[in-house]
Amino acid sequence: KSATVRVASTWDFGIAANQAAWAILDKHGHALDAVEAGVRVPEADLKNHSVGKGGYPDRDGKVTLDASIMDAEGNCGAVAALEHVTHAISVARRVMERTPHVLLAGDGALQFALEQGFEKENLLTPEADQAWHEWLKTARYQPVINSEVRDYGAGKPAALPGGKDNHDTIGMLALDAHGKLAGACTTSGMAWKLHGRVGDSPIIGAGLYVDGEVGGATSTGVGEEVIRNAGSFLVVELMRQGRTPTEACREAVMRIVRKKPKTAKDIQVGFLAMNRDGEVGAWAIQSGFSYAVCDAKNQRALIPSKSVY
Ligand code: SD4
């Protein structure tokens, strides 16, 4: 079967991110460059409150970013709880290419980024600061299912400032013209999290996993449940056993649901997968998850994921 050059990413903001990735894939560029360029788009988008600059802070008002990147050969790099640098994904790539390590966290990740020439910035936008102050009035930590609505503690879900374009993590998977896969994942994590909380996104095998022989997977939603189940690694291993990307994502979602049925009812987790032929599939716990797919035939597809509920 012939492979199709393609890029896929989580949520509707994936459409714009895919365009940046496609500009590289279309010129026979490398999947690794494509996914990095792709996820830099939402990282820089100030209207996006769940990725990069403009992301909602933790409960102490600090914006801390998690990101990871991985190629088909098992090379990978990640940063966790990184402050003051917009493009966490590019720092993750530097960790991969310029250190003997896989994951740098907190102050050490920032120190490394600054040594590498990244600019120190304030990532807390006035809008995010205002939302944080709003949340501080009740200061209740309760993530809700999809992030179009979020419970600020008033007892009923309140619309997020900025409206419907607010979604979670961006995870992106690409297959290039050389037949190589790569993946990237970047997020500001759960809004109002405890300072120091690290989600699934920078954990290789949880928020992202790529195996050149099989395919790649990435996740969005409540990271704790993804980490607990080594989610993206699980999706890739299920594809290795012959499942399609969609079937593999479904089984990984069901693993979470079966393990903690009560928790699963109230949270969202979505997986996105691409196999080595470029076939894409997804599954989520709750309805509302969507993913964007871009290839030579269809540049701006947005596909609603199937879900358990
Ligand atoms: C995390 N998987 O940090 C990410 C998703 C997220 O709002 O931030 N959702 O758990």
Image (tube, rainbow, N blue to C red):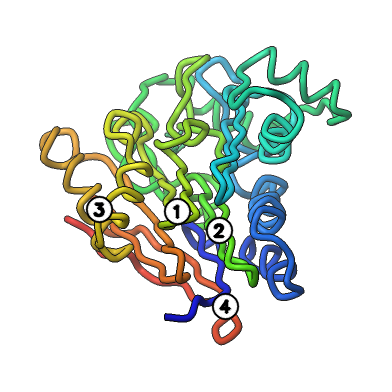
Residue identified by numbered label 4 = 295
- Name the side, left or right, on which 274 lies relative to 249: right
Cβ–Cβ below 8 Å for labels 3 and 1? no
Cβ–Cβ below 8 Å for labels 2 and 3? no
What SS does tag 1 mark? Answer: strand
Residue identified by numbered label 1 = 216
Instruction: Please report whichever mark, 1 or 4, sits nearer to the chain's N-terminal start.
Output: 1
Badge 2 crowding class, 10 Å Cα cut-off, few under 14, some 14 to 19, many 20 or more, is many
Between circles 1 and 4, the one closer to the viewer is: 1
- Name the side, left or right, on which 258 lies relative to 183: left
Instruction: Please report whichever mark, 2 or 3, sits nearer to the chain's N-terminal start.
Output: 2
Residue identified by numbered label 3 = 286
Between circles 2 and 3, the one closer to the viewer is: 2
Instruction: Please report whichever mark, 4 or 3, sits nearer to the chain's N-terminal start.
Output: 3
Q: CA distance from mark 1 to mark 4?
A: 17 Å
Three-letter code, disc 1: Gly
Cβ–Cβ below 8 Å for labels 4 and 3? no
